[in-house]
């Protein structure tokens, strides 16, 4: 009996350690892949060969690393680059730029960027969701609710918009 219990505990320990090792290895590989891509893009930037897509990707990497100032700088360079193709790509950059500003609690600037994205892509659900979040942070609850309702119009199953709009409806006075 005691021997079988020890075997069970040992087996559970091995499974847990194996799972942890796999998780650490996956994270290390992901980090290495990102760092390799970052080095390649930075080399292109240094040589003056970077494209709008490169600046966007660099800005996105900096966003993931929570380096918002560097992200904003690169996303702005992406918008200024002459080879940024299509309204959809431009809307993506504006949305990412808005996200970087929002992360720094610069909600007015974030809202401006989200609105630029929506001018280009009026059905851009993520930008609507982000705009609603910024409105909420600025305590513009009526505008936030309106934006969340637009999200639900475009994506009826959007869990964030459902939850936030229900919460806002409870707070807002009935018209």
Image: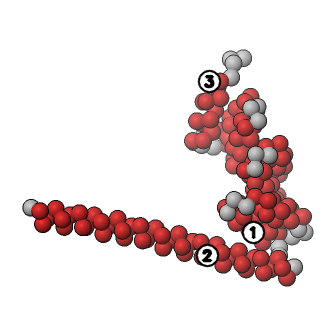
Question: Which circle's residue, 1 or 3, is located before the other in the chain?
Answer: 1
Q: Which residue is drawn at 48% across and 70% down?
A: 24
In which quarter of the view is residue 64 placed? bottom right
Compared across the picture, whether 16 is left or right of 47 comes to left
Residue most toward the left? 1
Q: Residue at x 86, y 65 (%)?
A: 77
In which quarter of the view is residue 130 placed? top right
**Residue 48: image location, x then y, percent:** 87, 79
Q: Can residue 87 be seen in this view?
A: yes
Compared across the picture, whether 83 is left or right of 147 comes to right
Up/down of 106 relative to 52, above or below? above
**Residue 32: image location, x then y, percent:** 60, 76
Instruction: Tell me the residue that label 2 is attached to.
Output: 33
Secondary structure of residue under mark 3 = helix
Q: Distance between the residues labelled 1 and 3?
A: 41 Å
Instruction: Tell me the residue that label 1 is attached to.
Output: 58
**Residue 66: image location, x then y, percent:** 69, 59
Instruction: Tell me the residue that label 3 is attached to.
Output: 170
Q: Distance between the residues labelled 2 and 3?
A: 45 Å
168 or 92, nearer to the observer: 168
């Amino acid at each position: 009996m005691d021997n079988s219990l020890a075997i069970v505990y040992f087996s559970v320990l091995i499974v847990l350690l194996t799972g942890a090792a796999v998780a650490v290895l996956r994270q290390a590989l992901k980090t290495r892949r990102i760092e390799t891509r970052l080095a390649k893009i930075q080399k292109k930037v240094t040589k003056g060969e970077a494209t709008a897509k490169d600046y966007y990707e660099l800005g996105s990497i900096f966003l993931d690393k929570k380096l918002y100032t560097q992200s904003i700088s690169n996303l702005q360079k992406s918008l200024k680059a002459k080879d940024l193709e299509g309204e959809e790509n431009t809307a993506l950059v504006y949305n990412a730029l808005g996200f970087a500003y929002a992360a720094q609690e610069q909600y007015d600037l974030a809202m401006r960027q989200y609105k630029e994205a929506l001018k280009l892509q009026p059905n851009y659900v993520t930008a609507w969701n982000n705009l609603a979040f910024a409105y909420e942070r600025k305590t513009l609850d009526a505008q936030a609710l309106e934006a969340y309702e637009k999200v639900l119009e475009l994506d009826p199953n959007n869990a964030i918009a459902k939850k936030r709009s229900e919460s806002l409806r409870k707070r807002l006075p009935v018209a």
